[in-house]
Image: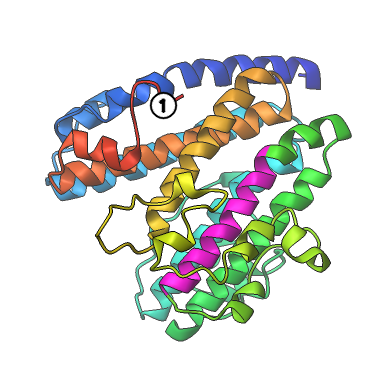
Amino acid sequence: MDSSAASSYVYAKASGLLSKSFVGPRLVKLFSVKSLRELYTLLFDDEIPAVPESMLAKQIEIKAENRFIDQYINLIRNFSKPAHILVSLLHFYDYDNLKDIAASLSLGKNEKPQLIDIKEYSMLNYGFWPNILKITENSKISWYNKVPEITEQQIFDSRLDSEYISELWESVKKLPKSERELVSELIGFEISVQNILWVMRLRVYYKMEAEEITEKLAYANKDDGKKDIFAGEALSILEKDTGLWDAWKDWKYSEFLNPHEEASVWELDPCWVEKAFNRKIAKLAYKSFHKNPMSVLSLVSWFKIKQNELNCIRTVAEGLRLDVESNELMNVAGVNASVF
């Protein structure tokens, strides 16, 4: 199949899959289920596993994730040589798998953790478990060649995050100019968001100093400082008091902050902000998918839309497991019938 025919086929196939997905107005249907069994039936066609509710929630999450990955891989397999960015998106799961492997081994566990299989697109040698040196050998993250101490995990994970972002951006730069300009807007915004979230997490959870945080951010050009397209906005919040609403209320992205109530104590919530940004990225991707059919951007957008759907499935599964009301879950996730 030539490139043009493959692009047409893949876009048609991706559109069909998206029409059956829980995105846009259909997302509300996902949050309306009343039990894990009902959620399973809504998502899948096979028989509900005869397992306890707590295990069923986990199985739903794993099955939904595997289906998403398999669908995406089947789409890009139609290209004899997929654009680098389409493969780099999948590498997110290699980086994530390595974090899970290291965490498990550092705790002395012998059982292999649940890993996401990205098949022929993986850059890691999982067959060498539990030898991390062999698992990462000949890959771009071969420096990760030992089991980190528990105290080193955050440092190693931060470096993995930075390298994944670098890989993404290098892949964007390899696109033809017409495609590069389209994809860079979506991916560039996401990289900026990841930097913002790193600053928030490192300050709130690890009480890290500003000078140390700046070394962990991803930059387009480190010499540009606060004008850098990736790190600029993250650098601008380094000194903001994470326990003072007044320090944040006029911030460029204040709409994504966890709510503030008068006369109540407010503390920056990175988890809330992350979910809010994820919804924004999903909205941008949804518009880009339909606006630029049969382009690399359409598949990049599809990937981001489906990632957000997966996050919502996890939210619903966990909420049902913990017996959280649907309306409360929807409020937390910011979901309504006009979400897009």
Residue stretch in magenta: 186-205
- Camera sees residue 45: no
Q: Residue at x 72, y 30 (%)?
A: 296
Towards the viewer: 75 or 256: 256
The residue carrying pointer 1 sits among few (fewer than 14), some (14 to 19) or many (20 or more) residues within 10 Å by Cα, namely some
Asked if residue 300 lies left or right of residue 50, the reply is right
Q: Looking at the picture, how far across and down is residue 21, in whole percent?
A: 42, 23
Q: Which residue position is annotated with label 1?
A: 339
Q: Looking at the picture, how far across and down is residue 334, in whole percent?
A: 35, 36
Q: Residue at x 34, y 75 (%)?
A: 109
Q: Looking at the picture, how far across and down is residue 147, in whole percent?
A: 51, 80
User: Does the magenta run of residues contain 265?
Assistant: no
Magenta portion: prevailing SS class: helix
- Camera sees residue 326: yes
> What kind of residue is marked 1?
Val
User: Does the magenta run of residues contain 196?
Assistant: yes
Q: Residue at x 75, y 32 (%)?
A: 182
